Image (spheres, rainbow, N blue to C red):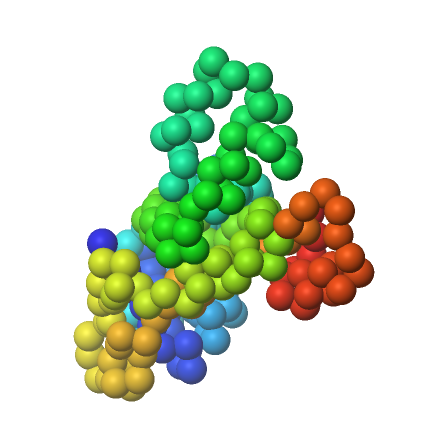
Amino acid sequence: MKIVVHNHEQSHVAAGWIWDCTKEEFFDGWIEFENGRIVAMGRGSIPPATPLFRGIILQRFINHHTHLGDSIFAETIRATVRTMDLRAVVAPPDGLKHRLLASAGKEEIVKGIVQSLQKMIYNGTGRFIDFREEGIQGIYCMHEALRTPLADAGITISLPSGENARNARETLYGDFTFQDMIFSFIFGRPASLTCTPSEIERILAAADGIG
């Protein structure tokens, strides 16, 4: 898989067919982006500067509810849920998926999360909201997966060519991790149905909330 990136410290223009989500149609136009944000947009095939690239431009998707720690058990749970009550599969503390999580090693869980992050990037997902089981350790697994270099996951970084991209090639190549390419919002939860105030404090310090 190959991803094209740009130098966030410069202003760039991209041109092509842009998706208008309000009218649900494409239009021929351009966008100018700076520091990772769109600062200007226009219609027409002649942009104000030479485009960094041309192509189809559309918003990335948001996945509002994920349990990426379950990734390594996806096939097992998918096959089992047809013959079991849903609560017996997912309800804490003794549901099937919680037993599987408790028996899995950290490296195995992190590897499964990395594989799911790779799929999300490939499918155009730009943000996700994840609900992490297994207490503080579950949150740490997500952090480790997000810090994984894209190159380690087989994702190739393709930087734009030309003089205006020289700094990008020199400073960014090989440094990208998953957290540079996809935004995460992590909800943690205690490792068991009973918890202490200190455990809640640790979870809130490491995650974006409890859920």
Q: Residue at x 68, y 65 (%)?
A: 202
Kindly indicate the quadrant of the structure image that contains residue 95.
top right
Residue 183 drawn above or below residue 36: above
Kindly indicate the quadrant of the structure image that contains residue 79.
top left
Furthest residue in direction right, as rendered? 197
Q: Is residue 208 left or right of residue 5?
A: right
Residue 10 horizontal/vertical position (percent): 40, 81
Residue 57 horizontal/vertical position (percent): 37, 53
Residue 25 horizontal/vertical position (percent): 44, 39
Furthest residue in direction front, as rendered? 103
Q: Residue at x 60, y 59 (%)?
A: 136
Q: Residue at x 49, y 58 (%)?
A: 142
Q: Is residue 52 left or right of residue 58?
A: left
In the image, 188 versus 30, the foreground residue is: 188
Q: Is residue 188 left or right of residue 80?
A: right
Residue 60 drawn above or below residue 150: above
Q: Residue at x 54, y 26 (%)?
A: 89
In the image, 121 versus 37, the foreground residue is: 121
Q: Is residue 75 visible?
A: yes
